[in-house]
Amino acid sequence: MALRLVQVGEGHPRPLVLAFLVGGDLDPKLRAAFGPRSCIVADGVAKGPMMGELLEFAHQRAGVREVSRLALIGYSAGCQRVRALYLAGVRASAYLLADGTHASWPSDEWQIAWLRELAGEARAGRALVVATHTMQGYTERLPKGQAFCSTARVLRMATGWKLDRAGSLERPVVTREGALWVYSYASADIDAPAHAAQLVRVVPELCARHLRAWVGAAEPPRTAQAPGLPINLLGILVTLLLKSTSRS
């Protein structure tokens, strides 16, 4: 298990932030972005434990008894864990999907439908969704069986926005409706440094700019399941939150 406790957090209940495919070198930036109140748990790999085990870890390592707000962060393939949690019935208050909204090529409808639904929730102000993409398109030209849909294309299909313009790290092109935000970053067609910058720079910046206020607000529109969600580690949450089979 690659789970680690980034920050214990304060109080009962407290916000819980779960970050996927996020390495330990980002821990100081995550703590600075969210402030001292949130419990932050991160996983350095894309695939791993689902909600029951994640809550158990937060309880055992940080003494979390109640979760007031839930934030899910995915970078690159870590966004697939966010997708799997959503499809398993987990609903967070805030989401950050950093250059990882991939799908198969051509895409299957279910790979877009969950994000389209989530975008609708954000447009209505019931959840915060912040997504980013670069302009890398090489993924769709890989050999048969290896190709996958670019992050920009998936976001276009899910939001209905053109997303055909992009800007620098300092001045990205931002498209917004309600609590749905898409940040478009310029890149070459194949651009590993641009993708890496989405983690080391963009993730902490957008956590501080958007997610911190949302998960720490006195009355945000939606919590993980209900206000002051009690953690029953003997099975209630596992039954409630993992009620459907997750898909990778």
Image: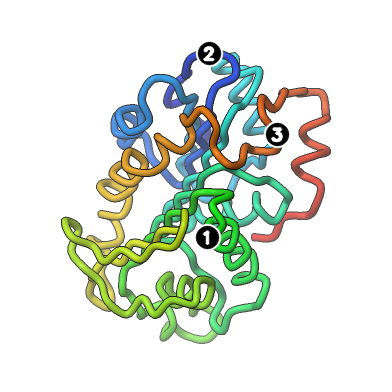
The foreground one among 50 and 151 is 151
Q: Quadrant of residue 63?
A: top right
Mark 2 crowdedness (10 Å alpha carbons): few <14, some 14-19, many ≥20:
some
In the image, what residue occupies the spot 59% across and 68% down? Answer: 116
- Image coordinates for residue 85, horizontal then vertical, percent: 65, 49
Q: Secondary structure at mark 3?
A: loop
- Image coordinates for residue 67, horizontal then vertical, percent: 62, 26
Upstream in the sequence, badge 1 or badge 3?
1
Tell me, yes or no, whether the two marked residues, 2 and 1, touch with CB atoms within 8 Å: no
Q: Secondary structure at mark 1?
A: helix
Residue type at mark 1? Arg
Q: Quadrant of residue 232?
A: top right
Decide if residue 233 is on the left or right side of residue 62: right
Residue type at mark 2? Gly
On-image quarter of the C terminus = bottom right
Mark 3 crowdedness (10 Å alpha carbons): few <14, some 14-19, many ≥20:
few
- Residue 154's tag is none
Q: CA distance from mark 2 to mark 1?
A: 31 Å
- Image coordinates for residue 66, horizontal then vertical, percent: 65, 21
Upstream in the sequence, badge 2 or badge 1?
2
In the image, what residue occupies the spot 32% across and 42% down? Answer: 209
Upstream in the sequence, badge 2 or badge 3?
2
* Residue occupied by mark 2: 11
Q: CA distance from mark 2 to mark 3?
A: 18 Å
The foreground one among 52 and 180 is 180
Mark 1 crowdedness (10 Å alpha carbons): few <14, some 14-19, many ≥20:
some
Decide if residue 114 is on the left or right side of residue 241: left
Name above or below for residue 115 compared with residue 48.
Answer: below
* Residue occupied by mark 3: 226
- Image coordinates for residue 60, horizontal then vertical, percent: 62, 17
* Residue occupied by mark 1: 123
Residue type at mark 3? Ala
